Image (cartoon, grey):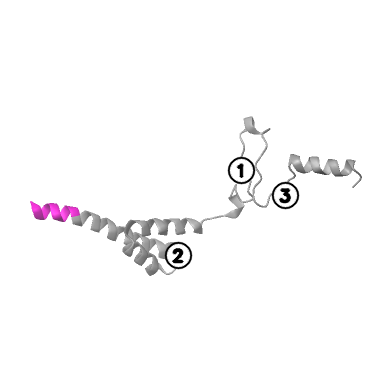
């Protein structure tokens, strides 16, 4: 009974671990993440986290900037919030209400 319990407690996680390593090795070669041995070693030596690292790297292969809705620092706004003032983001060259007031003050003073 103890040997069966030991085989279950050690065998099942070991089979899962080796299975994830084999999947990473096979899939890395299939999708073009070179070298596949590197991804298998990462998955083997860093048990579960290594497989998730592989999955994240694999998902970067299918990134298409043309279909990325956040590519230009834009995001969709619900129509009920369309009149709200947006927060500036990096690379945002739009004028704010403060900038418009400053320009009108300068024009009124003859500058």
Q: Are marks 1 and 3 in contact (CB under 8 Å)?
A: no
Identify the image quadrant of residue 103: top right
Residue identified by numbered label 2: 33
Identify the image quadrant of residue 26: bottom left
Q: Are marks 3 and 2 in contact (CB under 8 Å)?
A: no
Q: Earlier in the sequence, mark 1 or mark 3?
A: 1
Crowding at mark 2 (Cα within 10 Å: few <14, some 14-19, many 20+) = some
Residue at left offset 63%, top offset 48%? 73
Asked if residue 104 is among those painted magenta in the image, a careful observer would answer: no
| Magenta residues (range) | 1-9
Residue at left offset 75%, top offset 39%? 97
Q: Percent from the top left, x then y, of residue 84? A: 66, 34
Q: Earlier in the sequence, mark 3 or mark 2?
A: 2
Number of dots carrying numbers: 3
Q: Percent from the top left, x then y, of residue 24? A: 37, 61
* In front of the other: 64 or 108: 108
Q: Earlier in the sequence, mark 2 or mark 1?
A: 2
* In front of the other: 93 or 108: 108
C-alpha separation, residue under disc 2 versus residue under disc 1: 31 Å
Residue at left offset 39%, top offset 55%? 52
Above or below 108: residue 2: below
Residue identified by numbered label 3: 93
C-alpha separation, residue under disc 3 versus residue under disc 2: 38 Å
Q: Could you tell whether 103 is left or right of 91 in the image?
A: right
Residue at left offset 18%, top offset 53%? 9
């Amino acid at each position: 009974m103890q040997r069966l319990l030991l085989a279950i407690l050690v065998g099942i996680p070991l089979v899962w671990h080796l299975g994830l390593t084999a999947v990473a090795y096979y899939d890395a070669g299939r999708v073009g993440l070179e070298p596949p041995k590197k991804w298998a070693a990462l998955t083997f030596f860093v048990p579960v986290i290594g497989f998730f690292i592989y999955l994240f790297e694999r998902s970067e292969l299918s990134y298409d900037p043309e279909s990325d809705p956040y590519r230009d620092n834009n995001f969709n706004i619900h129509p009920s919030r369309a009149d709200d003032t947006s927060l500036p983001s990096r690379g945002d060259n739009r004028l704010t209400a403060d900038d418009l007031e400053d320009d009108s003050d300068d024009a009124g003073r003859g500058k």
